[in-house]
Amino acid sequence: YQAKRGGVRVGWYDAARDLASTDRLSLLAEVREALAVDDQLTLVLQPAVRLGEGGGVTGVEALVRWNHPRRGTLMPDDFVTVIEHSELLGDFTRYVLDRALAVAAGWATEGLDVPIAVNLSPRSLLDATLPADIAALLDLHGVRPDRLVLEITETVVMSELSVIDDVLSALRELGVQFAVDDFGTGYSSLTFLTRVAVDEVKIDRAFVRGMVESAGAAAIVRTTVDLAHRLGLRVIAEGVETAEQRAVLTALGCTGAQGYFFHPPMPPERIVEVLHGLTDAEVVPLRQEGAG
Ligand code: C2E
Ligand code: MG
Ligand code: MG
Ligand code: MG
């Protein structure tokens, strides 16, 4: 994943070199096929919960899985990088958005008003047709724009391209929300927060993992929570696995948390059960007072 690997421009090509080019080409042929048939590429969903104030789900993140006919279940890290460096990225991104919005539309018919978050490849922000595509998909599924959260990260290449700003502002005008994913790593930086008016900051799980033993990681988490509050943004900690981490994050005033400690990613059927298990008061409104 280029955003996590650091490095400069070369990072774009680096990741694609992970696979020999023949493997990459056959994988891409299989992706093309998977995009054309049902049920190979599926979404699992992971809730984020509010810390303190009685808990409750603040949103649900869609994570792609590939039920490959021969290779078994592939995780995003096994194939998303290859797609990102191919001409299939646009089709893949629309496919995931379409599936996620279909899920959200289903929730709405069951009276569940929960926002859904979709991960965007940084490269998707170079695609000038993305805002119109997203507008059409929201319309098709009848999902309110502010029920869609786009999780984005930055890369160094982006900082030089003004097309990104056009795409971001067109999406902003649509009324969708933005979360900065993996904050504190790669180029998900302070500068990025000034470039796009985001609604949410997600603290990378590396800092959450290190928080209890490492004063440095703890300081980064504390500072990020403070920064987000000062900017009027929600802040969600990723990868929370222990009660101790939850306690520290709650004490720091972190808005929400996501991780195996609360809920693993799960299939759409299961998540409906989880959401129905909550009372109305537990499904908390997405926007914080004063945010956005
Ligand atoms: P991410 O957006 O930061 O997603 C969070 C990752 O952390 C997910 O891995 C999730 O399963 C995992 N996770 C959740 N709770 C815990 C925990 O308590 N501990 C640990 N160790 N991990 C936890 P996953 O599903 O393998 O996704 C990896 C990355 O792939 C995502 O990172 C995201 O950047 C990317 N990705 C996933 N789905 C999509 C997609 O549809 N499109 C694009 N472009 N990228 C995607
Ligand atoms: Mg994410
Ligand atoms: Mg993340
Ligand atoms: Mg990520």
Image (spheres, grey):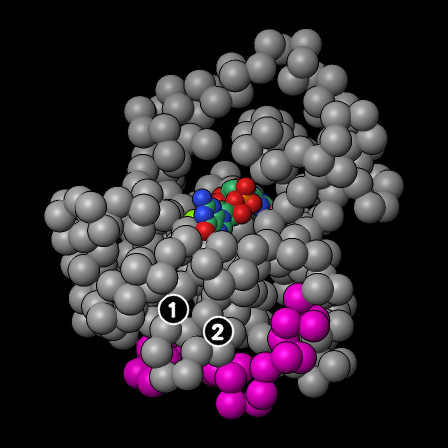
Is 198 magenta? The answer is no
* Image: 65 above or below 98: above
Secondary-structure class at tag 1 = strand
- Residue 130 in the image: state x and y as whole percent: 59, 52
Residue underneath mark 2: 58
Residue type of the residue flagged with mark 1: Gly
Q: Nearer the viewer, residue 45 or 230?
A: 45
Instruction: Find residue 226 and report its image quarter.
Output: bottom left
| Corner quadrant of residue 274 | bottom right
Residue designated by label 1: 256
Q: Position of residue 16 (x, y in %)?
A: 53, 20
* Magenta part of the chain: 271-292
Of the residues shown, which amino acid type is indicated by label 2? Answer: Thr
**Is-magenta flag for residue 272?**
yes
Tell me if mark 1 has few (under 14), some (14-19) or many (20+) residues whose alpha carbon lies within 10 angstroms of its own: many
Residues under numbered marks 2 and 1 in contact, where contact means CB atoms less than 8 Å apart? yes
